């Protein structure tokens, strides 16, 4: 019996393991090439690279072990092919995706950069005072926060960033929140919170519904998304030559998170909502935000930052942000994960520690250069699925 197993079963299992490893790497490469251009390729694209490449290495070692104990060398030609494919894919993952070659070659940071932070707090309880102090100590100039908890937590957040523009008199930021600071440096609208060292001039927002999927019985409870533009005055009245500078325009986003929806369709709905904006926004008056109905169209962005609920590098991103530069791809390095789902089961949670989903992005426009990009895990301020991204940009 043992002889039959070593002569027949083990060689075939060795060959099957090598073949399965090649198929897995082929599926991963297909996902990397097609991204989310098609509904079926999107699911290949979303599988974490470590799961795919790691599985191929495990199957390669399994095939070699089975062949070692077999009397016939099953998979003799497939194993060298799988070995070369594993080495090539691992090299691409380490240097092409994680950019580890940048680690020892940190570039000097210009003195005139703008440092911008974004965090989707997912409506979780956060040490707002401690986090705000950490951002101020880190020299962050503009903070974008999505889904901060309402009530006392949001007021604490406002008070924490009051040093951006302190005043003795208490001012209304909106009908619910007040702060001892100039309200031109703060904006709260629905789930969007902005605090800035620079004054805001104008804002506007559009919302969109989560897209439907083919089978409503499979539809998950996705929340609606929104895009908000914010116009900042970086220079006051004029620059050194006396010429008034162009405003700095940021699109702050939290896009629909329906997991089964095709992202190309989602981005088309986002683009349609932006193009059909009704012009209603807000403009900063003398001491209070006022309604503004004079907007003709969303202004072109210098930066788009937020939770895209779409993987970085996706083809669908070109619909909303054509010809924009991903800050991580330009100057970042590391595994780059910004979101890890919360899984209560301790055993099911382990594979997700190896998953790299970068869905919180900073896309930079043509007038600016990204010079540094960081992703920080905010565990000291509270457990939140999303991580903080900090980008530094400089005017070209």
Image: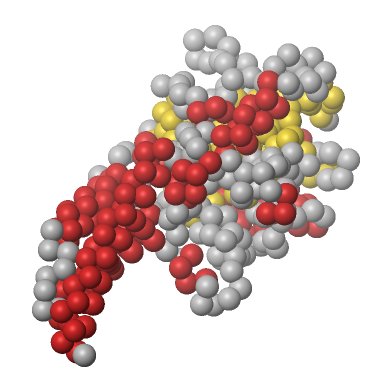
Residue at 67 percent of width and 25 percent of height: 272
Q: Quadrant of the N terminus?
A: bottom left
Looking at the image, residue 137 sits to the left or right of residue 293; the answer is left
| Residue 242 placement: quadrant | top right
At x 46%, y 43%, the residue is: 41
Foreground: 19 or 259?
19
Image mark count: 0
Along the line of sight, which residue is nearer the eye, 233 or 292?
A: 292
In the rendering, at what x and y percent does residue 328 appear?
41, 41
Q: Colour scheme in the image?
A: secondary structure
Position of 23 compared to 123: left or right?
left
Point out the image quarter for the C terminus. top left
Residue in the foreground of this view, choosing between 284 and 123: 123
Q: Position of residue 208 (x, y in %)?
A: 73, 35
| Residue 286 in sight here | no
Residue extending furthest right?
Answer: 175
Instruction: From the top left corner, tell me how far across and down residue 153 is, in percent.
Output: 76, 57
Rendered position, 88 above or below 384: above
Residue lying at 43% horizontally and 30% vertically, measured from the top left: 325
Q: Position of residue 285 (x, y in %)?
A: 81, 24
Q: Is residue 232 above or below residue 361?
A: above
Q: Quadrant of residue 5?
A: bottom left
């Amino acid at each position: 019996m043992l002889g039959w197993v070593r002569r027949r079963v083990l060689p075939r299992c060795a060959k099957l393991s090598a073949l399965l490893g090649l198929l897995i790497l082929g599926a991963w490469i297909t996902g990397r090439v097609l991204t989310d251009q098609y509904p079926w390729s999107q699911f290949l694209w979303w599988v974490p690279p470590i799961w795919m490449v790691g599985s191929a290495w495990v199957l390669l070692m399994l095939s070699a072990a089975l062949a070692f104990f077999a009397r016939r060398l099953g998979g003799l030609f497939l194993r060298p092919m799988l070995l070369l494919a594993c080495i090539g894919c691992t090299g691409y993952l380490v240097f092409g995706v994680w950019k580890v070659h940048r680690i020892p070659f940190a570039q000097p940071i210009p003195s005139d950069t703008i440092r911008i932070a974004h965090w989707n707090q997912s409506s979780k309880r956060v040490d707002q005072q401690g986090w705000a102090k950490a951002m101020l100590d880190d020299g962050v100039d503009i903070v974008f926060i999505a889904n901060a908890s309402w009530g006392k937590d949001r007021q604490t957040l406002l008070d924490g960033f009051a040093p951006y523009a302190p005043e003795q008199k208490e001012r209304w930021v909106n009908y619910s929140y007040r702060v001892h600071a100039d309200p031109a440096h703060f904006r709260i609208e629905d789930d969007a919170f902005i605090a800035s060292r620079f004054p805001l001039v104008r804002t506007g927002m559009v919302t969109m519904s989560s897209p439907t999927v083919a089978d409503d019985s499979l539809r998950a409870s996705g929340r609606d998304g929104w895009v908000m533009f914010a116009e900042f005055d970086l220079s006051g009245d004029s620059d050194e030559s006396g010429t008034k500078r162009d405003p700095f325009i940021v699109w702050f986003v939290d896009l629909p998170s329906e997991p089964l929806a095709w992202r190309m369709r989602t981005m088309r709905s986002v683009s349609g909502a932006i193009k059909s904006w009704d012009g209603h926004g807000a403009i900063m008056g003398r001491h209070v935000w006022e309604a503004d109905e004079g907007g003709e169209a969303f202004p072109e962005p210098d930066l788009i930052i937020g939770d895209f609920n779409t993987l970085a590098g996706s083809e669908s991103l070109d619909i909303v942000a054509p010809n924009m530069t991903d800050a991580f791809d330009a100057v970042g390095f590391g595994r780059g994960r910004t979101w890890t789902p919360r899984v209560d089961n301790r055993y099911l949670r382990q594979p997700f520690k190896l998953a790299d989903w970068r869905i919180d992005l900073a896309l930079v426009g043509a007038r600016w250069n990204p010079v540094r990009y960081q992703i920080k895990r905010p565990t000291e301020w509270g457990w939140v699925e999303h991580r903080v991204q900090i980008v530094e940009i400089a005017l070209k």
